């Protein structure tokens, strides 16, 4: 009796970046390998870890098939290790997940959704946090889909992954996808309930990682902040000009003006106008320089569909048997012609 048909049209890569404790992480990695083995013919698992965990984890992963272990330098947080895993993955679809979340999602279903919609599929938790409005606002200012409900599990097609890795800040792009009309981002709730935590990072580790992401978003929000300051500077310049006009009108129409009021008011309005114009020019110039340095590419092409089959025409021209179904009669018909040409060439006949 034949078993289930395995998909052989894609290569799947599943990446783990927080597999620190071998006794707890290896069973879940092995379960993931068994799941992939039941659905796909071509697949791989990447485990990214610091050098401190090399010996024990590598020895425990020997029995798990198709595992690539990547040892990285010390001091990298989980977000940076995600970038390394995504850069080294060779699959047509790459799933970046956590040992705590991998059993909560239907990985093949996420991959199917990513393929059907050519989209980034993000895991999303139900819980909400008080900081959600601030994170969402900061993410909008920095140009990313930032949310405290986003989980670490994500499925990304290869074409989209290349764009995220080419982003000026790939650490943020892989954690919170950029706000781009040509990039489809879908969120998926966990498919299974699993409250077991095999490895929880320390409080200091979580705070360091979150602080790094916050600082990166603040940095990426620089152009938006400069735009706000430039608008305020323009408002200050216009207000100073109107105030100067008001001072001149009062000077021409009033006779009982306090001594020195006109001179002081014109000096203040002139100083404010100069500061507003100078600050506006500086902010606009810095914003332009930051946009040039960031160089974020915009891709307006979402998908491509075609009926062109170039390989079939090439195989026919070269007489290549691609499916092994060529009949014996076809081969016999081709044989006399080739022999005749060989004899004519050898005999020197035209």
Image (cartoon, rainbow, N blue to C red):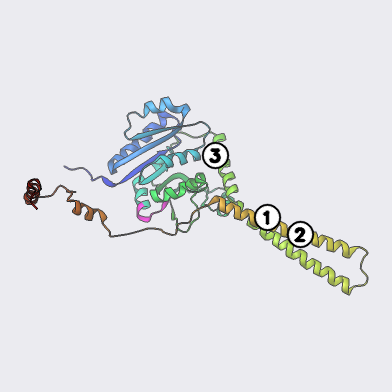
Mark 3–mark 1 distance (CA, rounded to whole Å): 33 Å
Q: Is residue 39 left or right of residue 49?
A: left
Q: Quadrant of the rendered structure where residue 236 is?
A: bottom right
User: Mark 3 sits on what residue?
Assistant: 209
Secondary structure under tag 2 reads helix
Q: Would residue 278 be visible to someone looking at this image? A: yes
Q: Residues within 10 Å of mark 3 (few under 14, many from 20)?
A: some
Closer to us: 45 or 147: 45
Give the magenta range: 115-120
- Disc 2 marks which residue? 274
Q: Nearer the viewer, mark 3 or mark 1?
A: 1
At label 1, counting other C-alpha atoms closer than 10 Å, the crowd grade (few under 14, some 14-19, many 20 or more) is some
Q: Nearer the viewer, residue 3 or 169?
A: 169
Location of residue 313 with respect to 174 vertically, above or below: below
Q: Which quadrant of the rendered structure holds the N terminus?
A: top left
Q: Cα distance, mark 2 to mark 3? A: 42 Å
* Label at residue 282: 1
Mark closest to the chain's N terminus, 2 or 3: 3
Q: Is residue 29 magenta?
A: no
The image position of residue 110, as x and y in percent, is 37, 48
Q: Nearer the viewer, residue 244 or 350?
A: 350
In terms of sequence position, does the residue under pointer 1 or pointer 2 come before the other? 2
Q: Position of residue 51 (x, y in %)?
A: 47, 28
Q: Is residue 270 above or below residue 138?
A: below
Q: Position of residue 170 (x, y in %)?
A: 49, 45
Q: Point out which mark residue 74 bears.
A: none
Left or right? Give the position of 318 relative to 298.
left
Tell me what residue is drawn at x 67 percent, y 60 percent. 231
Instruction: Mark 2: give few (<14), some (14-19) or many (20+) Cα within 10 Å.
Output: some
């Amino acid at each position: 009796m034949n078993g289930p048909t395995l998909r052989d049209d894609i290569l799947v890569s599943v990446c783990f970046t927080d597999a620190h404790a071998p006794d707890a992480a290896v069973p879940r990695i092995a379960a993931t390998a068994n799941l992939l083995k039941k659905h796909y013919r071509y697949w791989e698992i990447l485990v990214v870890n610091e050098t401190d965990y090399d010996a024990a984890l590598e020895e425990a992963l020997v029995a798990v098939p198709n595992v690539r272990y990547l040892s990285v330098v010390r001091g990298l947080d989980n977000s940076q290790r995600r970038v390394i895993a995504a850069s080294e993955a060779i699959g047509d679809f790459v799933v970046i997940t956590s040992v705590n979340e991998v059993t909560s999602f239907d990985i093949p279903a996420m991959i199917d959704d990513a393929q059907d919609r050519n989209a980034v599929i993000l895991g999303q938790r139900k819980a909400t946090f008080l900081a959600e409005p601030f994170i969402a606002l900061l993410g909008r200012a920095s140009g990313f889909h930032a949310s405290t409900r986003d989980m670490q599990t994500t499925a990304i097609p290869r074409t989209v992954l290349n764009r995220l890795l080419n982003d000026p800040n790939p650490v943020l792009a892989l954690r919170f996808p950029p706000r781009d009309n040509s990039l489809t981002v879908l969120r998926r709730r966990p498919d299974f309930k699993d409250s077991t935590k095999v490895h929880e990072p320390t409080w200091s580790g979580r705070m360091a990682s979150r602080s790094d992401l916050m600082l990166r978003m603040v940095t990426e929000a620089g152009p938006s902040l400069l735009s706000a300051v430039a608008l305020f500077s323009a408002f200050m310049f216009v207000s100073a000009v109107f105030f100067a006009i008001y001072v001149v009108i009062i000077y021409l129409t009033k006779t009982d003006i306090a001594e020195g009021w006109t001179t002081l008011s014109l000096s203040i309005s002139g100083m404010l106008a100069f500061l507003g114009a100078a600050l506006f020019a500086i902010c606009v110039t810095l914003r332009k320089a930051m946009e040039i340095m960031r160089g974020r590419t915009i891709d307006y092409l979402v998908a491509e569909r075609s009926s062109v089959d170039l390989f079939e025409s090439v195989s026919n021209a070269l007489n290549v048997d691609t499916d092994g179904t060529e009949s014996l009669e076809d081969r016999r018909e081709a044989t006399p012609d080739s022999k005749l040409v060989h004899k004519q060439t050898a005999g020197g006949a035209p």
